[in-house]
Amino acid sequence: MIGRRWYVPWLFLAPALLVTALMTWGPLANTGVLAFTDAQALGGGQFTGRANFTRLADDTEFFRALGNTALYLVVVVPALVLLPLLLAQLVHAKLPGIGAFRAVFYTPVIASMVVVGLIWSWLLSSDGLVNAVLVKLRVVAEPLPFLTDATLLLFSCMLVTVWKGLGYYMVIYLAALSNVPNELYEAARVDGAGAVRRFRSVTVPTVRPTMLLVGTLAAISATKVFAEIYVMSSGTAGPGGQAKSIVYYIREVGLGVDGEIGYASAMSLTLFVGTLGLSVLALVLRRRSERNEA
Amino acid sequence: MSERTERSEGREGMPGKHGMSERTERSEGREGMPGRLGMSERTERSEGREGMPGRRVAAEPRAAGPTRRSAGMSRFAGPALRYLLLLLMTVLLVGPFLWQLSTALKSTGEPIYGPDTTLLPTDPTFGNFGKVTEVIPVWRYIGNSAIVAFASVLTNCLLGAMAGYALARMRFRGRGAVFAALLASLVVPFEVIMVNVFLTVRSLGLVDTLLGVLLPGAVSGLSILVMRTAFLALPRETEEAAAIDGAGEWARFWRVALPSVRGSLAVVGVFSFLFAWDDFLWPLIVLKNPDNFTLTVGLQYLSGTFTNDQRVVAAGTMIAVVPLLAVFFALQRMFFRGIGEGGVKG
């Protein structure tokens, strides 16, 4: 053990701790306090008890945002648990050029959500390529309002989230797949198991902990969806702002010109409880599956 | 099948390999009898694990004859089908970028939608890129984004390494508490505290400044944890030898420890850069004056002001994404290693 003065570690830690305290812990504590006040952007703020939360319970716009976010979660999470696993299976092979494919599949992850959102806005617009193809193939008679109908807009955003997330979760799955012994596949094949059966009986059980991790990561990021909706709707959240997510609504309430900091803080706190709940749920599921294995 | 596996395992430089499998491959030995030993070891390890369906299948002795024959039959059909699917996925995942590029290169006289639209520009032009610079100060936005991104790389690497070094190498009262607090900060989503972060930044007088954009992401908990893990993996001996030679605390950190964790520094740096460059929500909140926008906010602004010419918007998105993709393909191994370290362990 090297001897040193007591303050030396703190000098090393000071800048990082200062930033974390100022930019994470302080604002979090502030959120917890202001949630129980009527604080506005321009100062002030009286303690109002649970008033913000009772208001929240009657706020139809909040419940619409909550419903949109829940819908997002329900669609995006299963898609992002399953599809990247299939993609990882596809690139988990020793074939010439496979590394290039992996890199190529990762490109949407690298790009900013703004870039991706603008690219898909163009593809999905009424004059866009997707509608042109659909009309040409006579799947639809008229171009579909992918971006101008609130529900379709949400589904378009989900498509973008999944499209952009595929490569990211693929890489996480690849790490898990490299731990599956090839012999298991070989043996299953000898026993006459088809591709689907091999996937269900060999791959899925081995990567189940990773599926849980991916599901948790995807769920937490889905509860925070914002940029997709903002960009794809050009900052309008669809007709009448009906496609708002929770974060979208928090930003609007708390950071507008007459920002209602107290009310937005109450919503933020609610969101925090939601994301924590998802993490706890994931932990419980993990414990249970570990116990089942033991 | 097994033949093919062995052959390609001996190959060097498979891009896109994350650290873990690289290590595995290395330990399997490149020459001579590659694969064999390592493989059976791995099998045994996983056979020892409980509750794995398919274990029973694996435990059965391998019938060599039929395996080889069936592998021979599917040797060409299997890869061919796989390549077909790979190409399909390439079209799905890269096609949208290429369509955007194609639109960006079409001249004003050429239709970009309707029945006469062609897949490739008939008369490619860079004119739309010039128009982007007329509508928004795109160079300024690139500069702003670059300032924030490089500053974020610097602060995350330096401050993250300093804090990680203290947590990994020094014993002091409160270390456990500091570590726990940093871990806990990882579960606080930025979106939850953004309103109050804005209040803090406003009270510091940093609204509409690049410093205000930088500050919340200046040193993430993840950067500190990755650096701590890296320092923990270093042998202490060299630092202790340096201490005996009279090197001070800072010199041991700066001259001995830090150069040994260059790999992790690179990972932290690359991901800090990417995060800062791609971030949208926070710059959108903190920047008010269009002169101060970063590229992502500026692009959104461009599409708002100029939606009637999709060619210009497309050119703008290409300006934003092409340099990034160039860097990515140059450094791709680092990206994948970073996900292995940061995404899975962290």
Image: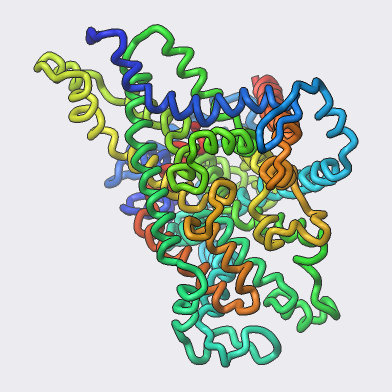
Nearer to the camera, A253 or A222: A253
In the image, taking residue B165 as reference, residue A213 lies left or right, namely right
| Residue A21 in sight in this render | yes
In the image, taking residue B321 as reference, residue B100 lies left or right, namely right
Instruction: State how many labels appear.
Output: 0
Looking at the figure, which quarter contains the N terminus of chain A? top left
Nearer to the camera, B244 or A270: A270
Query: Up-down: is B96 above or below A190?
Result: below
Give me the residue at 28% from left, 38% from top: B262
| Residue A77 in sight in this render | no
Counting from the top left corner in percent of width and height, residue B75 is at: 51, 62
Nearer to the camera, A142 or A77: A142
In the image, taking residue B324 as reference, residue A291 lies left or right, namely right
In the image, taking residue A162 as reference, residue A5 lies left or right, namely left
Looking at the figure, which quarter contains the C terminus of chain A? top right
Counting from the top left corner in percent of width and height, residue B5 is at: 43, 51
Query: Up-down: is A205 above or below A61?
Result: above
Nearer to the camera, B87 or A153: A153
Counting from the top left corner in percent of width and height, residue B219 is at: 43, 34
Give me the residue at 50% from left, 69% from top: B136
